[in-house]
Image (cartoon, rainbow, N blue to C red):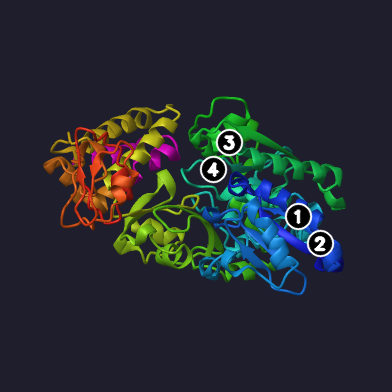
């Protein structure tokens, strides 16, 4: 530890977002510049360029921390290879940080109200290093757990109040107790990493940034239920997550942390990754197990539940990545510590993926009970282009749209359900005044219809008919009675579908009708889209009293269809216009209809 503390560290975000923004090239540039400048000799300390997991502020990648021993770490954002020589020469070898290139005050604001527990190692350690994991309390949790009886481990998890983070929020300790109580020599533990919600990437970031932490959580769960084999079901679209997790599993086998007599603690556990083909329905437990068994991912009726008859007919427990990631910290710090965080009904923290019309998109980890307003405005900087907040889709395709007057809703299971949404896996899609709520309902229903496995008629046929109605409305062809028909069909599909996909797919439609019925009526009765978003209903004309004569719209028009002179209102030539909506998207004043 002493040697590590005396080391100059360059921490570079090398999650998927960081690498896509050029993190590998930035790391190479640091290595090259260190050698060129003889940095180790100049400062008398060893240097390490370390690839970490995701920091959360994904829109600002590449993020780099310069950690000089004895000094406060400095964060730079939007780092490119061209900036690296200046950082090395002026900051590391020079007088101090480059103020103009540092991450702005918004970065401190982004972190201020977060409580990074699950993400505490993401962005701070080498995601691929077992040694660094061990230096940060790695495997302390499983060592503590095996000093207890399996039943005591389950009671500790119950005492913590941890609820499953995959969407349903079922108490984790209770779920473990069902599987533990089922007799049988062979049992299975499955980590559901089939993260399929549009815009959600929380689980991926944990797998990429703290794979050993997930393994430890699985080890504790396996010991508790009496299981000797664990699967991690990951969608194949996560190649970096699979690579790092497989590397961690292989290293654990080499070091004796997995396999026979794990860590010398007296229990056996084998672990394997199963790459899924990316079917959204495989996030549902029974479809997931069918996929592992080599069958098409289709749901089956319950009961029997997986805890009684699951994978290959054996008792099986399934939790998602974030749930297992929490388990380690419960045993590091105790159930009472975890229970003190959050609300009465939702303990601990929750990770959210913020996308849409918000200034700072990315991942945030906040205590349960934090309000939606605090997440959007205090953590993520508010609405893009300072437009009005209109709604937020909470819980992904299975959740609901909450309006602006619900912005004080707390992010916990009970409050979100009461408001007409759900926690889900943690996706929050932020919308402003330019978003059409009928079109949003159409978008999410289109997704779930395509992802339906088709096994049961209500989901297969019902969602198709609902989607056709929504498409007709957004094209200006809506009919009287369409709203009532959508509601009737939605309730029927929810009641009669076989699995959670069909049971929750109508939620975006029901919530948008509940809170934005006037938009549906305007589309149907007047043939107009109040948000000027549905392309077939757009007139492509400039509203004179709203136009600020800024000249932005002609600059973005790809076919030069907009005529404009300085100080004058713009004019759209409809003969040239291709209705691409570039002008509408660019206008900050909603001056284009």
Q: Say which residue label 2 marks.
A: 39
Q: Secondary structure at mark 1?
A: helix
Residue in the image at 30% along x and 55% along y: 588
Name which of mark 1 and mark 4 comes first in the sequence: 1
Question: What are the residue bounds of the magenta stretch?
Answer: 484-510
Residue drawn at 21 percent across, 41 percent down:
538
Residue 222 horizontal side relative to residue 398, left or right: right
Q: How far apart in space, not on screen, are marks 1 and 4 (Cα)?
A: 39 Å
Q: Nearer the viewer, mark 1 or mark 3?
A: 1
Residue of label 4: 195
Q: Are marks 2 and 1 in contact (CB under 8 Å)?
A: yes
In the image, residue 307 sits, relative to residue 295, either above or below, namely: below
Q: Main secondary structure of the magenta part?
A: helix
- What residue did someone put label 1 on? 33
Crowding at dot 3, Cα within 10 Å, few <14 / some 14-19 / many 20+, comes out as some
Which one is earlier in the sequence, the residue at label 3 or at label 4? 4
- Find numbered disc 4 in the image and state the secondary structure of the residue it sits on: loop
């Amino acid at each position: 530890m002493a040697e590590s503390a005396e080391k100059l560290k360059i921490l570079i975000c090398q999650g998927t977002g960081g690498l896509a923004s050029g993190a590998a090239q930035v790391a190479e540039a640091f290595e090259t510049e260190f050698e060129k400048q003889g940095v180790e000799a100049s400062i008398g300390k060893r240097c390490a360029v370390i690839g970490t997991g995701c920091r959360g502020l994904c829109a600002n990648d590449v993020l780099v921390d310069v950690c000089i021993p004895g000094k406060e770490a400095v964060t730079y954002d939007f780092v490119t290879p061209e900036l690296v020589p200046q950082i090395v020469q002026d900051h590391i070898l020079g007088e101090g940080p480059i103020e103009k290139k540092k991450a702005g005050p918004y970065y401190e604001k982004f972190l201020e109200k977060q409580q990074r527990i699950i993400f505490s190692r993401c962005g701070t350690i080498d995601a691929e290093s077992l040694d660094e994991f061990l230096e940060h309390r790695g495997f302390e949790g499983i060592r503590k757990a095996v000093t207890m009886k399996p039943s005591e481990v389950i009671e500790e998890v119950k005492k913590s109040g941890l609820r499953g983070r995959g969407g349903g929020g079922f108490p984790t300790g209770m779920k473990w107790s069902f599987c533990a109580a089922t007799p049988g020599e062979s049992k299975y533990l499955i980590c559901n990493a089939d993260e399929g919600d549009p815009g959600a990437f929380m689980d991926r970031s944990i797998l990429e940034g703290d794979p050993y932490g997930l393994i430890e959580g699985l080890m504790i769960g396996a010991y508790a239920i009496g299981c000797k084999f664990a699967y991690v079901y990951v969608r194949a679209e996560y190649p970096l997550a699979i690579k790092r997790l497989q590397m961690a599993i292989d290293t654990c086998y080499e070091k004796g942390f997995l396999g026979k007599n794990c860590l010398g603690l007296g229990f056996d556990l084998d672990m394997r990754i199963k790459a899924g083909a990316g079917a959204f329905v495989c996030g549902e437990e029974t479809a997931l197990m069918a996929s592992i068994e080599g069958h098409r991912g289709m749901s089956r009726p319950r009961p029997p539940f997986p805890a009684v008859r699951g994978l290959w007919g054996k008792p099986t427990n399934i939790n998602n990545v974030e749930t297992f990631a929490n388990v380690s910290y419960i045993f590091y710090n105790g159930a009472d510590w975890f229970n003190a965080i959050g609300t009465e009904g939702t303990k601990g923290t929750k990770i959210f993926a913020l996308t849409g019309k918000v200034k700072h998109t990315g991942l945030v980890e906040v205590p349960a009970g934090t309000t939606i307003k605090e997440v959007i405005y205090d953590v993520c900087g508010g609405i893009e282009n300072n437009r009005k907040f209109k709604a937020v889709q909470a819980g992904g395709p299975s959740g609901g749209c909450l309006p602006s007057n619900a912005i004080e809703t707390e992010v916990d299971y009970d409050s979100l359900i009461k408001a007409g949404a759900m926690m889900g896996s943690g996706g929050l899609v932020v919308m402003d005044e330019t978003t059409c709520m009928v079109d949003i309902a159409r978008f999410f229903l289109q997704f779930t219809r395509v992802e339906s496995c088709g096994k049961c008629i209500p989901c297969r046929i019902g969602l198709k008919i609902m989607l056709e109605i929504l498409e007709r409305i957004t094209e200006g062809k809506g009919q009287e009675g369409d709203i009532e028909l959508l509601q009737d069909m939605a309730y029927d599909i929810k009641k009669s579908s076989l699995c959670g996909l069909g049971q929750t797919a109508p939620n975006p439609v029901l919530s948008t009708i509940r809170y934005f019925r006037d938009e549906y009526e305007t589309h149907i009765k007047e043939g107009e889209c109040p948000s000027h978003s549905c392309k077939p209903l757009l007139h492509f004309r400039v509203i004179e009293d709203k136009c600020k004569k800024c000249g932005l719209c002609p600059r973005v028009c790809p076919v030069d269809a907009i005529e404009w002179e300085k100080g004058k209102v713009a004019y759209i030539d409809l003969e040239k216009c291709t209705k691409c909506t570039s002008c509408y998207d660019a206008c900050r004043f909603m001056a284009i209809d």
